[in-house]
Image (tube, helix red, strand yellow):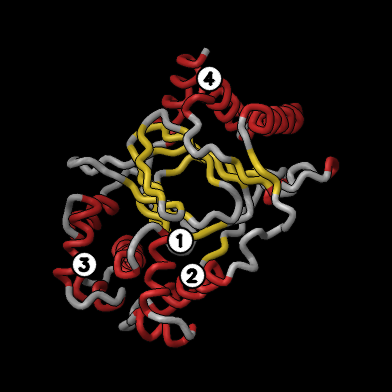
Amino acid sequence: MEFETIEHIDGHPYKLFVVSIGHRTHHFHKDLEIIQVLSGSIQIHIGSAVETYKKGDILLINPYEIHSIANLSDAFGRANLLLIIQIASQAFEQNAIDLSQLHFDARRLNNESSWLSPLMVTLYKQSIDGALSANYKRLGTLYQLIGMLLERLSYVVSKHHLPKAKDEAFKRILTLIEYVETHYETPIKLETLADQMHISKYHLSHSVKQTLGISFQTYLNTVRMTKAIQLLYTTKMSVLEISERAGFSDQKYLNQMIQMHHHCSASVLRNRARTAALPMPAAPIGTVHLPFDINDAQVAMDLLLCTDN
């Protein structure tokens, strides 16, 4: 499984960016993550919870929570546009506050949008400002944002830096995800993994459903589909070759998966990427990013500031 290492801006304890996500397979990181949906809609899996977030929604993902993100494009193939901030666990070293030890109870932060949305947009604009003064302004904005979260949201503090590190079920899921990520192109049976972990197939199946919110087969198909789409975007391989390379039994099965999630065939999805006005952005392993116009993002954030002010 991928543990995401996040690069922060110029040594500052956060990363803030605009992105359009086609799919992000299950992963976790020690940073606190806040996502605002600027347009479109996404589906988030966190544990057994599955929720849809649309334009204007804001959500919070706690450190070390295993989660996945999927685009919910409409019949016209229009994708999401997201403003994401990831705040380092050691953002406040001087005050000895480790954000990875906090667990906020809230998930959907729409009730906080009147102050949170303007702060995120302001921080984004300060982050792309090259002026020396902006370095100090954005740290002030970040501290204000975290202070408001701590003041307005309920949370618990864990005594352990990694509250789930000693949880055997959690460890098993990490082992399973890592195995699937590295062997997705070969036949994988849940019985084989269960035998290797010395537990029953039923027990492992229940753990997967409880932790990832989906069945093992659905998770496996999702990983394979993500790999296939990456190959569609980055190679000239035929759809048949890609389906075999991604571990699908046949080309028809891959097309069914892409049709279900993207409302088009694999060939059409590839053509959309090739005809995009902007190049496909780089993405972490297990991620399908989609092209977008930064001017559209700027307009969306300007509208947020006007609405909230």
Mark-to-mark CA distance, 4 and 3: 43 Å
Mark 4 crowd level (few <14, some 14–19, many ≥20, 10 Å Cα): some
Q: Tell me the residue at 34%/79% (across/down).
A: 185
Disc 2 or 4, which lies upstream in sequence?
4
As shown in the figure, which amino acid type bears the numbered disc 2? Ile
- Relative to 110, residue 82 above or below: below
Image depth: mark 3 or mark 2 in front: 2
> Circle 3 sits on which residue?
254
> Circle 1 sits on which residue?
211
Q: Tell me the residue at 66%/48% (across/down).
A: 8
Question: In the structure shown, which secondary structural element does the residue marked by tag 3 occupy?
Answer: helix
Mark-to-mark CA distance, 3 and 2: 25 Å
Q: Tell me the residue at 64%/44% (across/down).
A: 87
> Circle 4 sits on which residue?
114
Q: Position of residue 71 (x, y in %)?
A: 33, 47
> Circle 2 sits on which residue?
173
Q: Is residue 253 left or right of residue 94?
A: left
Mark 3 crowd level (few <14, some 14–19, many ≥20, 10 Å Cα): many
- Relative to 178, residue 124 above or below: above
As shown in the figure, which amino acid type bears the numbered disc 4? Ser
